[in-house]
């Protein structure tokens, strides 16, 4: 099958916060050095941010370093600064507040954000520096030269459920790059193929949880923007790791979520 070939210096797969931060930092370094290189980002979603799990508490240190402390004044969308926080152990009938905040759950100085909005803003920042962001282009497979990754082939368009071409079929392009960066999320298909072929999972392979994450609108006065709660305990058994959260946002909205580990023994368990 005949395919278009596109050459670039650096290819980043996935327009999430990690890839866009990488693209921004690299573009700034190249600009400072007076070195012109082409940086390209491909994103499977029809628009950047479409596949981002949005509600989050963000530690600002990374953005302070990346954007020289000017990210808020440059228009980065944030919901609210964290102004109060607590951790509760839940039972079927009540709750017990922790007398202290565990270090991993301390969010003083952090911000409640809608991450999909943040990455859309990051896209505008990298494009100002000349980075090309192509939306609606999922990576299908890695291109190899021996045991070296040489780029990515994007998915074919206009195919049916069985993979056969339909009217309007367009073959995916081969994007060849000197450097390929995979930032496609926690369970990316290209990353899985890379790990399988090169055995790069190492002595500490990733572990995963599953769960639910939603944004709710609640009655007026129920929660204030910047209130942050984390929970442990019920409805999980004492032997099952996991927990939940509630983050207050403007407009009477809350990010609410519940994520348990995958090592549960009861096959009937459903988060």
Image: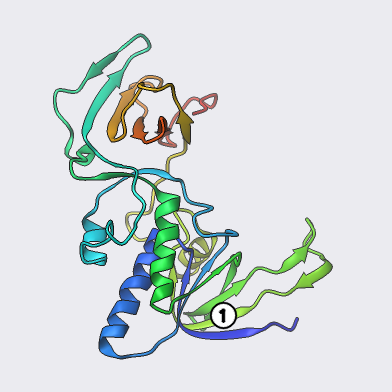
Looking at the figure, which quarter contains the N terminus? bottom right
Q: Provide the residue designation for mark 1.
A: 175
* Residue 186 image offset from top left, x and y in percent: 44, 53
Which residue of the protein is positioned furthest toward the top in this rendering? 93
Q: Nearer the viewer, residue 2 or 236?
A: 2
User: Is 100 on the left-hand or right-hand side of 5?
Assistant: left
**Quadrant in the rendering for residue 261:** top left
* Residue 214 image offset from top left, x and y in percent: 48, 35
Secondary structure under badge 1? strand
Is 21 drawn above or below residue 149 in the view shown?
A: above
**Who's the residue at 51% across and 25% down the image?**
269
**Who's the residue at 58% across and 84% down the image?**
6
Q: How many marks?
A: 1
Q: Nearer the viewer, residue 259 or 136?
A: 136
**Quadrant in the rendering for residue 112:** top left
Tell me, what colour scheme is on the image?
A: rainbow
> Dot 1 surroundings within 10 Å: few (below 14), some, or many (20 or more)?
many
Viewer can see residue 241: no
User: Is 82 on the left-hand or right-hand side of 116?
Assistant: left
Is 202 drawn above or below residue 29 in the view shown?
A: above
* Residue 42 image offset from top left, x and y in percent: 53, 69
Viewer can see residue 90: yes
Q: Nearer the viewer, residue 90 or 228?
A: 228
* Residue 130 image offset from top left, x and y in percent: 43, 79
Which residue of the protein is positioned furthest toward the right in this rendering? 167
**Who's the residue at 38% across and 77% down the image?**
129
């Amino acid at each position: 099958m005949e395919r278009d070939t596109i050459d670039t210096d650096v290819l980043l797969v996935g327009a999430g916060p990690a890839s866009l931060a990488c693209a921004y930092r690299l573009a700034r370094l190249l600009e400072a050095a007076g070195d012109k290189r082409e940086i390209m980002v491909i994103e499977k979603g029809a628009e950047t941010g479409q596949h981002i799990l949005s509600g989050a508490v963000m530690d600002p240190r990374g953005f302070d370093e990346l954007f020289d402390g000017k990210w808020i004044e440059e228009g980065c969308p944030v919901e609210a600064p964290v102004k109060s926080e607590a951790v509760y152990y839940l039972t079927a009938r009540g709750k017990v507040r922790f007398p202290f905040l565990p270090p991993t759950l301390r969010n003083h100085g952090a911000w409640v954000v809608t991450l999909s909005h943040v990455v859309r803003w990051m896209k505008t920042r990298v494009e100002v520096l000349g980075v090309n962001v192509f939306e609606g282009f999922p990576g299908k497979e890695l291109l190899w030269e021996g045991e070296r990754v040489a780029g990515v082939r994007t998915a074919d368009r206009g195919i049916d459920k069985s993979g056969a071409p339909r009217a309007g079929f367009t073959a995916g392009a081969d994007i060849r790059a000197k450097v390929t960066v995979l930032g496609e999320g926690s369970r990316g298909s290209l990353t899985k193929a890379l790990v399988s072929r090169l055995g790069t999972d190492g002595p500490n392979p990733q572990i995963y949880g599953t769960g639910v994450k939603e944004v709710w609108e609640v009655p007026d006065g129920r929660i204030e923007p910047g209130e942050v709660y984390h929970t442990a305990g019920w409805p999980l058994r004492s032997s099952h790791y996991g927990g939940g959260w509630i983050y207050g946002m403007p407009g009477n909205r809350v990010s609410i979520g519940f994520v348990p580990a995958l090592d549960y023994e009861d096959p009937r368990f459903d988060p």
